[in-house]
Amino acid sequence: MPTGIDGVEIRTGNLKLDLAETFAPEKDDDPAKYTKGLGLHASSFPDTYEDIVTMAANAAKRLMERKGLQPDDIGRIDVATESAFDHAKPVSTYVAGCLEQVFEGDFHHANKGERKFACIAGTQALDDAVNWIEAGKNRGRAALVIATDTALYERGDSGEATQGAGAVAMLVDEDPDLVTVDPDQGYGSADETDFLKPNQQFPSVDGKRSMQVYLARMREALTDFERSWGDTHPDQFALVPFHTPFPGMVRKAAVLGFRHLMRGTDIEDALESEIGRQPRRDDFADDEAFMDALSEYTDALGETDRYAEWYDDTIESTLAISRHVGNWYTGSVHLARAAGLREAAQAGVDLAGEHLLVASYGSGAQAEIHAETVQDGWEAEIEQLNVEDQLDDRYDISWSEYETIHEVHDYDETTDVDPFTTPSREFVFDGWGRMGERK
Ligand code: HMG
């Protein structure tokens, strides 16, 4: 029985920082650096009563209610995060504790864990859940996979403009409504130190280098994927959701992906008179000369109409939510998939039976490329997302409120600040170990 994602829910932090109106003027920057250069308009932030547990629990609660599930239907809860506050007790136990307050029964039978490998951990948890079911160990139960993060950087860090906060909950089951996660996958993995959080809340990041590492690991993963999939062609994939730290990063990765997928195809033939053929390593004396030629070819490819058309069809729609929420770390690529599917449903495009190429990445560093197939129930499922309402309902913080809320979420500071928004019938944070549903 094919296995994959049966349902998805997202939960954004309840606050919004507008990059053009609020952030850029304080940094004395041209707003276009953020809106055009990085491709970001706003970041989501958690209010004073929100953290990785509350966002995860609220996303999972809505998903379980919508799917008519009780704890007995779930045999596994895995949370992926790089914002954990506990080195021993996994976030999934806190989330299960919240859910047990509102559903019948308990999760005592469920295997719970926490997955860590920077942003790619969300996809690793998804892979684990699929493998658990396909190995026949689920005994008829589904898995809950939740990617949740507060992606905050030190004030003044180069990453500050790319912050974000939110959770993506996925129900993984046999015969799924949304997509199957298919066996073809490829990896690019190396020991890298461009983005670290060694016993610290905010990352130490070499931003420029992190972008190079992202592209290098993606290149390896694509090559490895092709070994599994066989001959590729860009038109084989209806959508290509990438890990999206900011849309400008995906712009750089997408052309590289297109170049890989179109090698040896009719597209390369058709573009030959315009930009030549793709350089092959054997034609060059050393790696440096080859890489220079490849980079020149990639730049020229990015300027072609054929590439622009592919980008508009397969990439642009996947960035529709990220532009307004920033980096959600482990949830980011899953948000990109949801955004692409949602935009297709709204445009009346039928994706049933089409393939997705999902490009995940985590610093440290590892990329995974895998294929998915869209299922018949995808449209009805994705139309259930209330993401527009959630984004519209966010409270737009001023610069001084931003300074306050950043400090509230700094574990080293103790700040007692009233919330900016009012939670209703949702899980809220009211002190370590005490989560409650506010009626
Ligand atoms: P920066 O150095 O402040 O920005 O931060 P910049 O000067 O490079 O400008 C950004 C872009 O805006 C550039 O575009 C500029 O040209 C353009 P590019 O040349 O690169 O195409 N620009 C303008 N465009 C139009 N009008 C203007 C204008 N001005 C400038 N007026 C940096 C950029 C990425 C370094 C920073 O945001 C950062 O450090 N981010 C955090 C690290 C990060 O996100 N890395 C991405 C890859 S690693 C990753 O994805 C993993 C991660 O999610 C963590 C994990 O896995 O756990 C981060």
Image: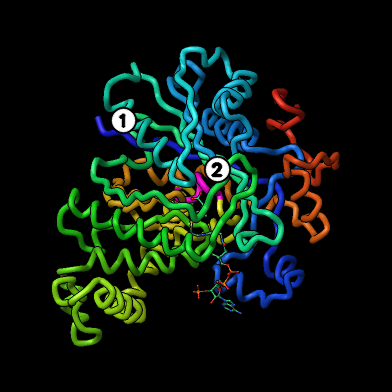
Bounds of the magenta segment: 328-333
In x, y percent, where is residue 268? 19, 75
Residue under label 2: 10
Q: In the figure, residue 297 lies in which quadrant?
A: bottom left
Amino acid, disc 1: Asn
Q: Is residue 84 above or below residue 274?
A: above
At x 61%, y 20%, the residue is 97
Badge 2 amino acid? Ile
Q: Nearer the viewer, residue 309 or 124?
A: 124
Asked whether, in this view, residue 273 is left or right of residue 22, the answer is left
In screen coordinates, is 422 left or right of 44? right
Q: Look at the image and tell me in which quarter the N terminus lies.
A: top left
Q: Residue at x 39, y 36 (%)?
A: 126
* Image spot of residue 58 (x, y percent): 61, 34
Crowding at dot 1, Cα within 10 Å, few <14 / some 14-19 / many 20+, comes out as some
Quarter of the image where the C terminus is located: top right
Q: Tag 1's secondary structure?
A: helix
- Which residue is under mark 1? 131
